[in-house]
């Protein structure tokens, strides 16, 4: 069990960029240990410096390979990099096979790169918070760039990727269902779209289909998401991708406190409130006799759950 | 053209069989039930209680079976098979320094093996010299360490290359090792058209089975094809590829998958060589194959027979060969290493015998038998001698080789052969639909099939649905290892390092550098690399130096992991 | 809401040995038993393995080797783990490791060796029973 003094030590280690401290800190937030809120509260003021890039898209598009090449390219540009690779946990066994770091395993020897694999652990929303906190830890540790990689397969993945300032959606030809393979939500939040495996004959069609779909759904925004082409296996197009990411960053910085930043902060505050409400208010309400009474009434069809909740909250003095 | 059974007689037989099933059989089952409710072989094919002529009612002898030495070659590629010439007894060997392995080669030849087969150590297989950082701790441990032409000369010292054929299990760096072998032949004064042997050189299977890939898929196929093309023109007795199923099987595939994936790799190499502009009848007869012989005796024999027939059909119908020899599937077989146990290792002699017999009854051209200490260490001299004797006993004492395809016509054997062919063809069509071997590899198709089969096998073993004698049943208390383990002298690495240092001091470094530059430029121009490769090895450029040049041009492969 | 703590396992292939059938079967079995498994892929240096274990903050490391190079590679790995402060990680090994080497390896800090014929169930059980709390 980590004591208060140890948290101090841990935070100091993180701020110095020590890999062991970063690793232990991420474990704390991943397991939502009691010390986690203290840890995040202490490092939060040191965050906000890193450039956070989200990489998502359907399976088989070559995201992990592309992530590896992106990290390589940033290293060439003299940046230190953190990577958080998220993979799904099995809903049946609860276990997970975390295989993304294999594609960049040679970077493990580079001490300016930190790679962490995280499993979704089947707690809706839980992984989004843990990922955000992991990103914050890497940010506070001084990493210039943090890449978050996740399979774009569901609502929670959209939540995860919101932690990024620039969201790159990676697609590839021949994945079946073409544009449909990019789940709803990703098309809306993508800042840059990439067609990987661009050396294939059908890559141009995928790119133009994407372009068309984007134009149809064009939002009121000064940033028009471009469609780029890469060949992750050779690294072709990766430099141009990073240039575009930088362009997007400059765009964001030129905007007054960007709308998305505000929306994200609001969403996080609301989530934090909800969590506090659950852990304190709900917890205490459950202990009351009235709670058990109302349960019996619900089963006997004397009262519906929503009205029962209102009754409990009114008793607490909450409108 | 030659239906084997009269339709009316078969109908009568069916009635008799039904009578048996309704009277004699149930009476017996009442007294004692069968050991299992269902019996399956390794590929999951149901094994029936009994096979009768009914199971062969579709068989037309001339169309489906034929005579040995004639299409569809089901019964054998040669008209006299082992009555004319026994299979080659070719024992895979290699460890320590070239001098150590040279000694083992000579021992095996003295004890009666009829061909050499070389095992290289991991650094050599991955294109590293013995002094590379990645080679540390691995030099000479799993095979012989060969870093230069000089090492190769020592390896074949006193072994006349015009009298002996040599197989080399080498894939990524195959062009380098072949170049070295040719250089040794040149030095011995043997004309190149007399050099006989095989380079495994099957890079496709590396991506999903043996995993010893250096370069990405397209470049690897290019190098394989360079060797096929070069041999077709300059080394007529050399088998440029040994299209392998052994490693696919050892990685966990079942027999049908082994069969299908191997054949598909063969199809891919024919296609890649045709793309070079060669005519199929020019090179097809030198394509050779390599299979495992696993535990299920009849399944393995059926697999070997089905392989021959499928290949003959593929060559005839897909590639339109004119020369019958182009339809021959010549194979080397190795008994399965992964079936051998560390527990009660002497039992492995029985396993290897059954597997070797299956290979002979399956009509192999060449055979390696594993030593009983396989699961514990590299073969000791005594263990490898027993393995060789196993082949000799089958050859001279069992009578098995005295008639051709003795199981031909067995109702079970023909039915099983047909079923394996059918199932393998399903896979082949599937891979065709995916666009071929490389797209399938990139999709992780082979890898997933193999991983799933491997996991299934392990689950069945853990759950005791499959008995492994001595391991999950019939165990004994083994407090210490019952046999003496052979170990490689740790001084080998030091010796090799000293050799390399000396070589680099004594050679003409300018000449070596120039040869490497020529290789680089030839690779960039996408030429056939064999000629410049031979020059480079003769200039004593090392294996590692050559591999670095190629990595520079082709890049390095990163594995797609499928679990 | 509290996330359930999971056992994190690193399955590693040190050196040039390319036999990964066993490592992958074990990785899959551990995943099916509810653990989070990080697999390094083939041809890892001791430094890569130790650093991966550190970054992933794993509870357990499983080393798979069939090439005989364990005598050189395992001591390097254990030393690096010590240097990086990963003394509380449980390390086990599997593959082809002669009986006569096992005692030395255990003295070195490899907690258990699972040779050919081991069932995946026994490995799973061992990890559950011996993972450092």
Image (tube, rainbow, N blue to C red):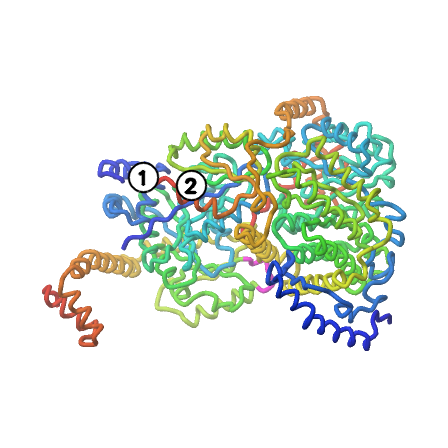
Residue B384: percent from left, percent from top:
72, 35
Answer with the quarter of the image where residue B41 lies: bottom right
Q: Is residue B527 left or right of residue A191?
A: right
Kindly check if marks 1 and 2 are in contact, taking CB atoms under 8 A apart as contact. Answer: no
Residue B350: percent from left, percent from top:
70, 43
Q: Chain of mark 1?
A: A
Front-most of residues B104 and C120: C120
Answer with the quarter of the image where residue B447 lies: bottom right
Tell me what residue is drawn at x 27 percent, y 60 percent: A267
Q: Is residue B275 visible?
A: no
Task: Specify few, some or many for label 1: CA neighbours under 10 Å numbering under 14, 14-19, or 20 or more.
Answer: many
Residue at label 1? A14
Q: Is residue B557 left or right of residue B538?
A: left
Tell me what residue is drawn at x 63 percent, y 45 percent: B338
Q: Chain of mark 2?
A: C
Task: Kindly indicate whether the residues beneath marks 1 and 2 are on one polypeptide chain.
Answer: no
Residue at label 2? C60
The part of the chain drawn in magenta is A197-202
Q: Secondary structure at mark 1?
A: helix
State whether residue A161 is above or below residue B506: below
Front-most of residues A39 and B346: B346
């Amino acid at each position: 069990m980590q004591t208060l003094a140890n948290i101090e030590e841990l935070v100091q280690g993180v701020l110095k960029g020590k890999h062991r401290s970063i690793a232990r800190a991420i474990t704390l937030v991943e397991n939502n240990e009691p010390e986690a809120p203290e840890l995040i509260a202490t490092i939060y003021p040191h965050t906000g410096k890193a450039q956070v890039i989200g990489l998502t898209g359907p399976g088989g598009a070559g995201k992990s390979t592309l992530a590896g090449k992106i990290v390589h390219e940033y290293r060439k540009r003299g940046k230190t990099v953190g990577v958080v690779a998220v993979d799904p946990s099995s809903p049946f066994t609860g276990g997970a096979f975390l295989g993304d770091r294999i594609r960049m395993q040679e970077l493990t020897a580079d001490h300016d790169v930190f790679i962490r694999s995280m499993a979704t652990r089947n707690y809706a929303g839980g992984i989004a918070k843990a990922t955000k906190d992991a990103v914050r830890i890497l940010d506070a540790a001084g990493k210039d760039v943090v890449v978050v990689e996740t399979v774009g397969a569901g609502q929670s993945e959209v939540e995860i990727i919101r932690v990024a300032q620039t969201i790159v959606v990676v697609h590839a030809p021949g994945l079946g269902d073409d544009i449909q393979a990019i789940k709803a939500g990703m098309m809306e939040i993508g800042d840059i779209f990439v067609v990987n495996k661009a050396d294939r004959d059908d890559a141009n069609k995928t790119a133009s289909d994407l372009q068309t779909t984007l134009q149809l759904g064009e939002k009121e925004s000064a940033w028009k998401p471009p469609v780029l082409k890469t060949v992750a296996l050779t690294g072709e197009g990766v430099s141009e991708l990073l240039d575009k990411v930088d362009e997007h960053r400059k765009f964001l910085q030129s905007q007054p406190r960007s709308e998305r930043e505000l929306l994200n902060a609001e969403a996080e505050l609301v989530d934090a409130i909800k969590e506090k409400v659950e852990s304190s208010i709900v917890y205490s309400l459950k202990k009351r006799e009235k709670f058990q009474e109302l349960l019996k009434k619900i089963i006997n069809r004397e009262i519906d759950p929503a009205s029962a909740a209102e009754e409990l909250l009114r008793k607490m003095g909450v409108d | 053209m030659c239906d084997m059974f009269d339709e009316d007689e078969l109908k009568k037989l069916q009635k008799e069989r039904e009578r048996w099933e309704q009277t004699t059989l149930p009476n017996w089952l009442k007294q004692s039930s069968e050991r299992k409710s269902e019996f399956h072989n390794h590929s999951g094919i149901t094994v029936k209680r009994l096979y009768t002529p009914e199971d062969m009612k579709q068989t037309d002898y001339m169309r489906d079976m034929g005579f040995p030495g004639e299409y569809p070659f089901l019964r054998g590629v040669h008209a006299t098979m082992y009555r004319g010439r026994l299979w080659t007894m070719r024992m895979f060997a290699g460890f320590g320094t070239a001098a150590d392995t040279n000694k083992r080669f000579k021992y095996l030849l003295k004890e009666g093996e009829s061909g050499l087969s070389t095992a290289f150590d991991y650094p050599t297989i991955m294109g590293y010299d013995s002094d590379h950082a990645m080679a540390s701790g691995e030099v000479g441990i799993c095979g012989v360490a060969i870093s230069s032409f000089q090492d190769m000369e020592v390896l074949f010292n006193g072994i006349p290359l015009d009298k002996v054929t040599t197989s080399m299990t080498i894939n990524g760096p195959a062009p380098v090792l072949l170049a070295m072998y040719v250089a040794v032949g040149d030095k011995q004064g043997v004309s190149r058209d007399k050099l006989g042997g095989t380079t495994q050189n099957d890079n496709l299977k590396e991506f999903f089975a043996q995993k010893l890939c250096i370069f990405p898929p397209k470049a690897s196929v290019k190098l394989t094809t360079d060797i096929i093309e070069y041999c077709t023109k300059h080394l007529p007795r050399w088998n440029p590829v040994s299209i392998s199923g052994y490693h696919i099987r050892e990685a966990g595939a079942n027999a049908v998958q082994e069969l299908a994936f191997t054949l598909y790799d063969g199809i891919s190499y024919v296609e890649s060589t045709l793309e070079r502009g060669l005519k199929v009848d020019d090179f097809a007869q030198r394509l050779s194959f390599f299979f495992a012989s696993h535990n299920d005796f009849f399944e393995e024999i059926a697999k070997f027979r089905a392989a021959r027939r499928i290949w003959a059909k593929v060559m005839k119908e897909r590639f339109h060969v004119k020369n019958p020899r182009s339809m021959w599937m010549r194979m080397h077989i190795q008994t399965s290493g992964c079936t051998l146990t560390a527990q009660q290792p002497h039992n492995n002699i029985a396993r290897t015998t059954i597997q070797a017999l299956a290979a002979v009854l399956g009509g192999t051209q060449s055979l390696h038998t594993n030593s009983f200490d396989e699961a514990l260490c590299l073969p000791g001299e005594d263990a490898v001698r027993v393995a060789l004797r196993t082949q000799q006993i089958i050859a001279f004492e069992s009578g098995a080789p005295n008639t051709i395809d003795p199981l031909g016509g067995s109702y079970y054997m023909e039915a099983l052969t047909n079923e394996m062919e059918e199932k393998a063809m399903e896979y082949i069509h599937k891979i065709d639909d995916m666009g071929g071997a490389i797209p399938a590899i990139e999709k992780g198709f082979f890898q997933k099939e193999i991983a799933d089969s491997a996991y299934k096998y392990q689950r069945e073993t853990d759950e005791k649905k499959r008995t492994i004698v001595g391991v999950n049943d019939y165990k004994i208390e083994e407090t210490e290892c019952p046999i003496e383990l052979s170990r490689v002298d740790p001084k080998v690495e030091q010796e090799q390092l000293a050799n390399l240092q000396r070589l680099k001091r004594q050679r003409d470094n300018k000449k070596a550098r120039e040869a490497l530059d020529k290789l680089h430029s030839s690779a960039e121009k996408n030429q056939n690399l064999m000629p410049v490769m031979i020059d480079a090895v003769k200039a004593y450029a090392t294996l590692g130096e050559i591999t670095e040049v190629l990595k520079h041009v082709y890049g390095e492969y990163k594995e797609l992991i499928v679990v | 809401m509290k996330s359930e703590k999971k056992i994190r396992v690193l399955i590693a292939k040190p050196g040039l040995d390319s036999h990964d059938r066993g490592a992958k079967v074990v990785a899959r079995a551990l995943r099916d038993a509810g653990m989070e498994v990080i697999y390094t892929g083939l041809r890892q240096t001791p430094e890569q393995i130790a650093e991966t274990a550190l970054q992933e903050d794993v509870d357990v490391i499983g080393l798979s080797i069939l090439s005989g190079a364990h005598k050189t590679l395992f001591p390097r790995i254990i030393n690096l783990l010590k240097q990086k402060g990963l003394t509380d990680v449980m390390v086990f090994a599997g593959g082809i490791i002669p009986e006569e080497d096992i005692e030395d390896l255990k003295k070195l800090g490899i907690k258990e060796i699972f040779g050919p014929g081991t069932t995946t169930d026994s490995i799973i059980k061992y990890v559950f029973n011996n993972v450092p709390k």
